[in-house]
Image (cartoon, rainbow, N blue to C red):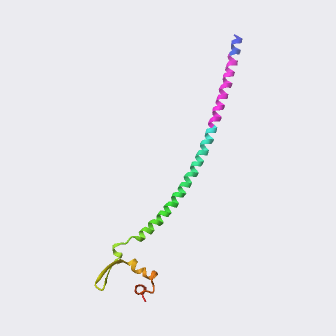
Amino acid sequence: MERALQNYERTTKEATTELLAAWEAEREKLAQKERQLEETRRCLELEAAEGRRALEKDRAAFAVEIGGVEGMIVRPEDWVLLNVGGKYFETTRRTLTAALTVAPDSLLGAMFSGR
């Protein structure tokens, strides 16, 4: 009986040692996986931050582009009908006032400069 008890204790001790070793190996695998996931998370956060910066840059460029396009839109109230010697011409205020910068010494430039 004592021999059986010793065998039982030895087998139990061996099984316990094996289980502890297996548990420790699994714990190390999980710790390694956790480190890998943490590194992956850091990389993804950096990529997301770079993406957000690029998006904000694109948004700012788009806003500038929208402003430029809106500046090109001719509203109905900006159209001007000219009667030049009985012949009618239609143009925009912008075209007429552009003479101030394009040809300031011309007759049209003089008309819009207030001289």
63 above or below 11?
below
Residue 37 shown left or right of residue 7 in the figure:
left
Report if residue 27 lies within the magenta region: yes
| Residue drawn where x is 34% and y is 75% of the image | 77
Q: Quadrant of residue 92?
A: bottom left
Q: Is residue 17 visible?
A: yes
Quarter of the image with the N terminus is top right
Quarter of the image with the C terminus is bottom left
| Residue drawn where x is 50% and y is 60% of the image | 58
Closer to the camera, 86 or 50?
86
38 above or below 2?
below
Closer to the camera, 44 or 31?
44
Judged from this view, the residue extending furthest toward the bottom is 115
What is the span of residues highlighted in magenta in the rendered image? Answer: 8-30
Residue 67 shown left or right of residue 8 in the figure:
left
Residue 39 drawn at (x, y percent)? 61, 45
| Residue drawn where x is 33% and y is 73% of the image | 76
Q: Is residue 80 visible?
A: no
